Amino acid sequence: MRVWLGAAAVFLGLGGAGNAGECIGSNLFEQMPPEQRNQIEDAVRDVPYHEGLFWRASKGDQVITLVGTYHFGDPRHADSMARIDPFLSGADVLLVEAGPEEEQRLTHALTEDPTLMVDNSGPTLPERLPPEEWQALTDAMSQRGTPAVVTAKLRPWYVAMLLGVSPCMMQGQAESGAAGLDHLLVDRAKELDIPVRALEPWDTVFTLFRDMTPEQEIDMIRASLPAAAYADDYAITLTDAYFGGDVWKIWEFGRFDAYRNSGLSHDEVDGLMQLAQTQLMDRRNASWIAPLTEAARDAAQQGRGVVAGFGALHLPGEKGVLRLLEQEGWSIEPLDG
């Protein structure tokens, strides 16, 4: 559970600048007993397109180059940009989750309306959590630069998302301002005078969790707390998996970690994981197919293709972008390697 919110921040477009490459921690995959690693491998094996960050979708003369991105800074993005640049240089348009205009509107909205992140109408988090969990939460949030008086009124989904980002990534965001792969793509497109187009509205993030029950909201926090103390290890584990192309392993790692450490039953974890997948990925993936294919159709009339960059966890799965394109008659081939 903790890791799916960490993954949300890092791989699904909810993160910002920072530098996970500066985090010091251990790769938790490498420390797992063999039977635990085998469980994750078994869960991943039959998931469509579970490995790979760079793909080409083609349909006749229409071509989409798809890039699974990571939203925090890392020196290894330089290699990714070198790989993508030949495709971007000849593209008609770059499609991303949120372009500069959408990010400006989001920033303005947060400035004008604090209730998007703060709940002043309902019970506070210390009123909704047992004392020992509230204390654990305040300790974890203070490490992320948020005092208890502020945490108390934050919306639960935002608190859980912050718990999913390690303190070292928070520090990197404040100090380095290193750009994630999405921003690097946008900056390069500007240099090349290539239009940038958003795949979804600027306020999408605020709609992702609005259907959750109060109990589900608190479960998000409750399940995030046990691993918050070793968040730097999570940062290393997730980023190493990403740059190794093991995209869906990131998701299943979170499931099995929650089984062991969250205090929730397997059924409760599976229910929350399915809710997260539906809200964070499946619905958004389906909504992106029309703008992706329409852009490719228009570009083909100019003898060009398009490039699309979005969080890597949107690529795999039966309801991932690659499978959805395949179901509409597109041929999918990997560009990794």
Image (cartoon, rainbow, N blue to C red):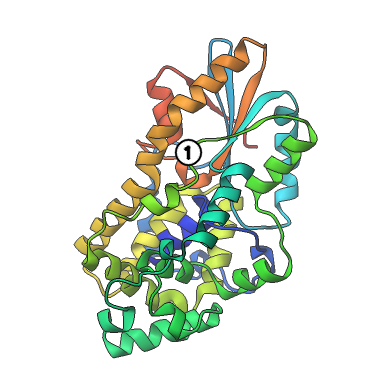
| Left or right of 264, for residue 249 | right
Residue 176 picture location, percent across and down? 74, 66
Q: Nearer the viewer, residue 299 or 332?
A: 299
Q: Is residue 30 above or below residue 202?
A: below
Please state which amino acid type lies under the numbered disc 1: Glu
95 displayed left or right of 122: right
State the image quarter where residue 53 is shown: top right
Closer to the camera in the image, 76 or 156: 156
Residue 122 location, quadrant: bottom left
In the image, taking residue 107 as reference, residue 120 lies left or right, namely: left
x, y percentage for residue 166?
54, 71
Q: Establish if 317 lies above or below 39.
A: above
Does any portion of residue 22 appear in the rendered image?
Answer: yes
Which of the 4 image quadrants contains residue 18? bottom right
In terms of secondary structure, where does tag 1 sit? loop
Q: Write the residue at 70% across / 50% down.
A: 77
Q: Residues within 10 Å of mark 1 (few under 14, many from 20)?
A: some
Q: Give the residue furthest to the right.
A: 191
What residue would you read off at disc 1? 200
